[in-house]
Image (spheres, helix red, strand yellow):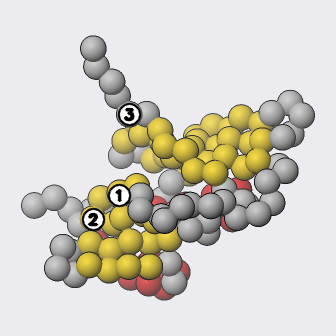
Amino acid sequence: MKFKMIHENYNVKNLEESLKFYEKALGHTEKRRITAPDGSFTIVYLGNDTTDFELELTELRDHKEPYDLGEGEFHLAFRTDDFEAAKKLHGEMGCICYENPSMGIYFIQDPDGYWLEILPPEK
């Protein structure tokens, strides 16, 4: 029996703000969208041409308060082919929330507080 990871879901407060963030910060764009017939939720799947793994963003119409992310001790990781350019962009965006120079990594934070790890190219 084999399993393949296909997506991770993040619930977001403002879908359009999140879509702009993920496109600018990580180059991920909308692949497809599902909207409930009654408008109670919208799901957007994001991705790019480097992998078939997707990030699923869900906006619940009636959920207006920020999501409780607990202690925030989880994250999704992204490897970039140009670490310095990525770090420059993320610095300009003001979304770098933690750096670990000894490990050669840093984290950015999306509009809802989710942490995203940025890794340099594999050596």
Secondary element at tag 1 = strand
Depicted 103 relative to depicted 122: above or below: below
> Dividing the picture into quarters, in which one does residue 3 lie?
top left
What amino acid type should be assigned to the residue bearing mark 3? Met
Front label number (3 vs 1):
3
Secondary element at tag 2 = strand
Q: How many marks on residues?
A: 3
Pick whichever, 45 or 106, lies toward us.
106
Left or right, 5 with reference to 57: left
Left or right, 64 with reference to 103: right
Residue at numbered disc 2:
119
Residue at numbered disc 3:
5
Q: Quadrant of the C terminus?
A: bottom left
Mark 3 and mark 1 residues within 8 Å of each other at the beta carbon: no
Q: What separation in Å lies between label 3 and label 2 (alpha carbons)? A: 19 Å
Report the residue at 62% width, 61% height from top.
68
Residue at numbered disc 1:
78
Mark 1 and mark 2 residues within 8 Å of each other at the beta carbon: yes
Q: Position of residue 1 (x, y in %)?
A: 27, 14
What amino acid type should be assigned to the residue bearing mark 1? Phe
What amino acid type should be assigned to the residue bearing mark 2? Leu
Depicted 50 relative to depicted 96: above or below: above
Crowding around mark 3 (Cα neighbors within 10 Å: few <14, some 14 to 19, many 20+) is: few
Report the residue at 41% width, 44% height from top.
49
Left or right, 95 with reference to 40: left
Q: Residue furthest right?
A: 38
Pick whichever, 62 or 120, lies toward us.
62
